[in-house]
Image: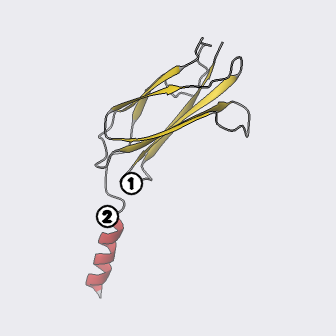
Amino acid sequence: MSATACGGGGDDDDPQPSEADLAITTTPPINGQQEAPAVGPDFPLSVTVTSTMPPQGVKIEVSARTDVSGSAPFYTEVKNTSTKTTNFTITNTPQGTSCRLTVTVSSVSKPSNTVSGFYLYSRK
């Protein structure tokens, strides 16, 4: 029976393999700060995984909405990738209002390994 218990422990390890904590950088940075208003209408975003890439890659979720509690996103995109840098183009940003862009990066092989942040921006 103790062999079964050991086997069960091994099963628990398989779905959640050991891997480095995810670390990313973004341009613009996801630092919770307000970016200077820009003309738009499109806003580029670059997400770079600076830690070791998980074996099955990452899922990057990007969402933008007006910075009003409960507002629905006007832009969402999800990409699964194994490349270090992934580019997005934020579209449909309304003029003259502060918007919140949120980025969440999760390991495909270990979904609990995640990092996220946001920044505020606006379209002139």
Question: How many C-alpha atoms fall within 10 Å of the one at disc 1: few (<14), some, or many (≥20)?
Answer: some
- Rendered residue at 53%/20% (across/down): 43
**Which of the labelled discs sits on residue 12, or is there none?**
none
| Residue type beneath disc 1 | Lys
Q: Position of residue 84 (x, y in %)?
A: 32, 33
Say if 123 sits above or below 13 in the image: above
72 relative to 46 in the view: left or right: right
Q: Quadrant of residue 85?
A: top left
Q: Camera-side residue: 13 or 122? A: 122
- Rendered residue at 65%/32% (across/down): 65
Q: Quadrant of residue 23?
A: top left
| Residue type beneath disc 2 | Asp
Q: Quadrant of the C terminus?
A: top right
| Residue identifier under label 1 | 110
Q: CA distance from mark 1 to mark 2?
A: 10 Å
| Residue identifier under label 2 | 14
Q: Camera-side residue: 63 or 13? A: 63
Q: Earlier in the sequence, mark 1 or mark 2?
A: 2
Q: Position of residue 19 (x, y in %)?
A: 31, 50
- Rendered residue at 29%/88% (across/down): 1
Mark 1 lies on a secondary structure that is loop
